[in-house]
Image (spheres, rainbow, N blue to C red):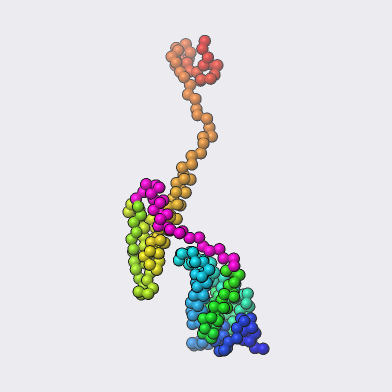
Amino acid sequence: MSDLDAFQTRLGYRFQQPELLRLALTHSSISHAAGRPAPNNQRLEFLGDAVLQLVLTRELYDRFPDLDEGALTKSRAQLVNRRALAEQARRMGLGSGIILSRAEEANRGRERPSILANTYESVIGALFLDGGYEAARVFVLGQFSDEFSHLKPAPQLLNPKGELQELLQATEAHPPQYKILSASGPAHDRAFECAVFNAGEEIGRGRGTSKKTAESAAAEAALTTLRARQASAAAEAVVPSPTHPPQVQPRCSRNSAADQDGFQCAIPGTRHDQPR
């Protein structure tokens, strides 16, 4: 059994075009070693990253119908990061199949998290080209089944704009004012940036794919800022109790015979303060 055959067995998928798998396992250091352009897995990595994001995004969308866009994005970030992808690659023994230059091999490239994560995405890209979206989806969801079973969705604010309005009203502040700062991107993929102000002061800023989501993101940022200010003010308002009793001032009266200065002083509560 060849190395590619053994690797396909570990993948649980048989490639119709095995050369795609070989390309997915070929690190860019091969091109550098050859001193000229040579086929490597960078393009497949680019494709695989997009496919991975799509599969996980759809799964999150289906599993958590009550989560808003922001919470879904944060939940996806728990699943897709360099460390998590490198760990997935280690589980399936991906490092042993990577085709590296001698120099990268000497630098222990098979163990480097960045190389493992990038190659993992390349394999997903190869699966997509060879077997279509369904083949890639089955592979990814099988790989991430444990992660989904333990995933704690990111918390969300159900109505950040309403919560901000209530918070400002409770402190008798001015109502929030929202302003769209910029809009960019093509018509089908717009990106908006919004700032929210209170009495002329910017208290939060956020981005979104619509004006509504950008305003919600700005309100969420403002809530974080204002609550931090409240906590800081509450901490400063705590005054420690005195550790020393107040000083008692003596009462002095005119008495030329008492001392040379003509004053006789008595401290309240002492025997000198008793009537004679």
- The quadrant the N terminus occupies is bottom right
Query: Residue 10 or 85: which is nearer the viewer?
Result: 10
Q: Measuring 37% from the left and 74% from the top, which residue is drawn there? A: 188
The residue stretch that appears in magenta: 149-174
Q: Is residue 151 left or right of residue 234?
A: right
Q: Measuring 50% from the left and 27% from the top, which residue is drawn there? A: 247
**Does the magenta-highlighted stretch encompass residue 164?**
yes
Q: Position of residue 269 (x, y in %)?
A: 53, 20
Image vertical order of residue 248 relative to residue 104, above or below: above
Q: Is residue 187 left or right of residue 44?
A: left
Regarding residue 79, the answer to whether it shows in the image is yes
Image vertical order of residue 136 relative to residue 179, above or below: below
**Does the magenta-highlighted stretch encompass residue 268?**
no
Image vertical order of residue 168 relative to residue 250, above or below: below
Q: Measuring 44% from the left and 15% from the top, which residue is drawn there? A: 253
Image vertical order of residue 168 relative to residue 192, above or below: above
Regarding residue 81, the answer to whether it shows in the image is no
Q: Measuring 57% from the left and 78% from the top, which residue is drawn there? A: 138
Query: Residue 27 or 161: which is nearer the viewer?
Result: 161
